[in-house]
Amino acid sequence: MNAVAEAVAPDDEAVADAPPPVLDIRQADAHYGKAQVLFGVSVRVPRGRVVSLIGGNGAGKSTTLNLVMGRLRASAGAVELDGRSITALSTEQIIAAGVACVPQRRRIFGTLTVLENLEVGGYVRRKDPAGTARTLEEVYTLFPVLKKKAHMMGGVLSGGEQQMLAIGRGLMSNPSLLLLDEPSMGISPKLTTEMFADIRRIAQTGRTVLIVEQNAYAALGISDHGYVMENGAVALEGPAAQLMHDDYVRQTYLGA
């Protein structure tokens, strides 16, 4: 077990007694044009838990996030957020409903300050300045370096700091569901360990997190539940600790 997993591994009994899902994808198919890219995908993300989607390139992980965010429409099946169908909603409506997505390669605004980037993330809450201010302080508590560098341009931050900023920007909307797409991309192994520990701490504050990640060891190490995707379908699922000891997962994704 890695250092992150040893420090913040989820409780097995809590995993077994999972609350109702914030996100419930049921038997979803999806197409890009005439080409089918998702095949009967079912994923449940319980409230306050961390769930990971692992798999190789082209497995369908990021495509599943596109489905949740309304960038891709389900041709069959359903996508629900807190029991409400979001299958036909626009991306803007899904964000307003409480979903935030931290994309691959962070996509921060390099010519804006750290504080301005965070304020952009809180724009959907512009009518709640007090709540936005509280969340800003929560982000600064989670990532103290962002407070220290609040008035520096985002573009001069290190890769790890930019990832912190991207996650902080996502949290500023106070989402009921936080989606993280390859958060370890372009980050050193040491910073990856720290980043995943931070993600676990986010969940421990009551947030709900869905991670898409090729670094299966790091993702499963902080997750309550995991899904293995292959060729646009869920090939295997189970408690994260169980998947980490599964022979197929170990040989295929963990390098064991």
Image: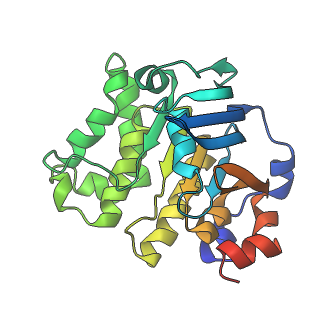
242 versus 104 height, above or below: below
Q: Quadrant of the C terminus?
A: bottom right
Q: Is residue 160 above or below residue 254?
A: above
Residue 207 vs residue 93: left or right?
right
Residue depicted at 20% across the width and 53% down the height: 154
Where residue 194 sits in the image (x, y, percent)? 48, 68
- Tell which of 99 and 129 is nearer to you: 99
Total marks shown come to 0
Q: Is residue 245 visible?
A: no
Residue that extends furthest to the bottom in the rendered view of this protein = 256
Q: Position of residue 42 (x, y in %)?
A: 73, 40
Q: Residue at x 55, y 65 (%)?
A: 214
Q: Position of residue 3 (x, y in %)?
A: 61, 76
Q: How is the image coloured?
A: rainbow
Residue 158 visible somewhere in the drawing: yes
Q: Is residue 15 left or right of residue 7?
A: right
Between 88 and 213, the residue placed more toward the observer is 88
Q: Quadrant of residue 1?
A: bottom right
In the picture, measured across the screen, residue 82 lies left or right of residue 247, that is: left
Looking at this view, name the residue that lies furthest to the front: 34
Please state which of residues 56 and 45 is positioned toward the viewer in this rendering: 56
Q: Residue 229 location, x and y as percent?
A: 67, 55
Specify the quadrant of the image occupied by residue 93. Answer: top left
